[in-house]
Amino acid sequence: MSNKPLIGMNADYRAAARSMPAYSYIAAGYFQSITAAGGIPVVLPPMDDPDAISQVLDQLNGFVMIGGADLDPRNDGFMLHPSVRPLDPVRETSDRLLMADIAERRMPVLGIGTGMQLLNVQQGGNLFLHIKEDLPNAVPHHDPQDANHRHTLDVESDSLIGRVYGDGEIRVSSRHHMAIDEVAPGFRVTAKCPDGVIEAIESEMMDWFAVGTQFHPECGAASALDIRIFEEFVDGVSQRIDQDLRLVA
């Protein structure tokens, strides 16, 4: 039996407040989905040491960048919009160091929500900061009263997302007010909401297996089809391991 791939994933961070200590955490859906797909999840707390991050990534086969609060647009040269609720700086610093190293070594990566947005920004794309203002004709992509809010999706058939969902009407769980504006060089859009909001991107680079979903296939309202995104990712990581082994042999 071949070894299961080690899939890293970042964790969120909440600063100390009153009688509560600082702590790091991750929604169970992320690591449960990787486990169900045949991988071994390895959760990384936020770190600000590039050498330590590199040492950890040396031991991993792939990475999932999880969702969360908003990227701080000031880190990319933009003004802070009133609607933006930034990630804690401890997490954002760590996430950006992680993504830079992952990109440099072309490690397979699946970015979800904020993770997809960071993948796009780190590679040279940019973001709409508030869909209601930037795309006023868009359908709702976030419902404060329904954490499992869903909307329809149009997918490109010749893509990982297309393999997962096939033909027919698709509905996915969505909870975001920021979205991709310009897509990073080397990536293409593989799924959109019918209103035009980008919901998935995939690398076109031969040497990098990288996928991003704005929607949340790990959430409690996920369907069996949604979970197949993790299966496709873990399978792709396993294929990358096999290719590397053949090159060494």
Image (cartoon, rainbow, N blue to C red):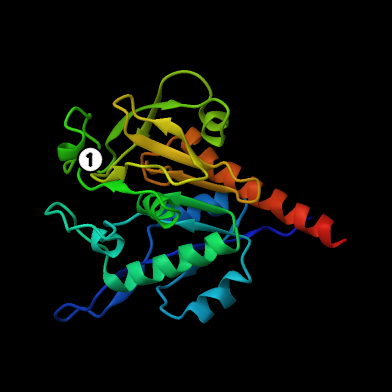
Q: Is residue 43 left or right of residue 69?
A: right
Asked which quadrant contains residue 216, the reply is: top left
Answer yes or no: is residue 37 visible.
no
Q: Is residue 173 left or right of residue 212?
A: left
Q: Is residue 185 left or right of residue 207?
A: left
Name the image quarter holding the C terminus: bottom right
Q: Is residue 52 left or right of residue 138?
A: right
Tell me residue 198's x, y (percent).
Answer: 36, 36
Give above or below for 9 relative to 159.
below
Tell me residue 140's x, y (percent).
Answer: 21, 33
Q: Residue at x 57, y 41 (%)?
A: 204
> Furthest residue to the top?
168
> Furthest residue to the right?
249
Q: Nearer the viewer, residue 231 or 163?
A: 163
Name the image quarter holding the N terminus: bottom right
Tell me residue 178's x, y (percent).
Answer: 26, 46
**In this figure, which residue is indicated by the disc labeled 1?**
142
Asked which quadrant contains residue 23, the reply is: bottom left
The kind of residue on which mark 1 rests is His
Query: How packed is label 1: few (under 14 Cα within 10 Å), some, or many (20 or more)?
Result: some
Q: Residue at x 14, y 51 (%)?
A: 83
Tell me residue 172's x, y (percent).
Answer: 37, 34
Q: Residue at x 41, y 20 (%)?
A: 169
Asked which quadrant contains residue 134, the reply is: top left
Q: Residue at x 60, y 63 (%)?
A: 105
Answer yes or no: is residue 143 visible.
yes
User: Callout 1: helix, strand or loop?
Assistant: loop
